[in-house]
Amino acid sequence: MNRIVLVGRLTRDPELRVTQSGVSVARFTVAVDRPFASQSGERGTDFIDVVVWRRQAETVGAYMKKGRLVAVEGRLQVRSYQAADGQKRRAWEVIGDRVEFLDRGPDSAARVPSAEEPPFPEPGDDGESTFGDEIDVGEPF
């Protein structure tokens, strides 16, 4: 079985490309904190390369930005290639089957009132009854 689940933050904006055959592919790196601390109390972080394809790639390319919290489910893939210096190299990457956005982006966050603007209208500003006015609810049942 080859299944991986990662939760972490994007280290940079995803790179979205289209292959010669017209298939979308996005690459990004997720920073995942290790679940334990060293003797000095510091937690390590792993930087894991992720590749997603087709519709998932288009969605990631359109909505994900550096720093966003994501969950990635997929499989580990190892590929070999020859580097420019002639050395044989290996690349380890997660092929993502599913990516979930775990936080809201800055554009989707609720609007926060400015310091000059009160979060709620002042009582009586709109001419309607104010919060706390008594109302008659009739006789109890």
Image (cartoon, helix red, strand yellow):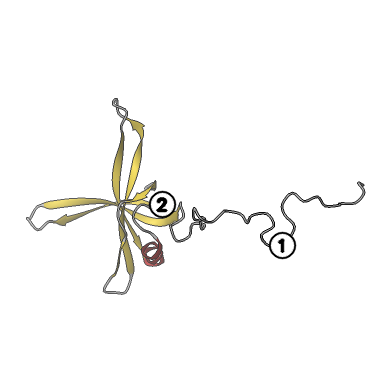
Q: Residue furthest top?
A: 39
Q: Residue furthest bottom?
A: 21
Mark with earlier residue (1, 2) = 2
**Which mark's residue is nearer the viewer, 1 or 2?**
1
What residue type is disc 2 on?
Answer: Val
On the rendered structure, is 102 left or right of 65? right
On screen, residue 35 above or below 141: above
Rendering coords of residue 134 (x, y %): 80, 50
Query: Is the residue under label 2 in contact with that under label 1 (CB below 8 Å)?
Result: no
Residue that badge 1 annotates: 127
Q: CA distance from mark 1 to mark 2?
A: 46 Å
Helix, strand or loop status at disc 1: loop
Nearest the camera: 86 or 72? 72
On the rendered structure, is 116 left or right of 130? left
| Label number found at residue 70 | 2
Nearest the camera: 72 or 43? 43
Residue at 28% x, 26% y: name it: 40
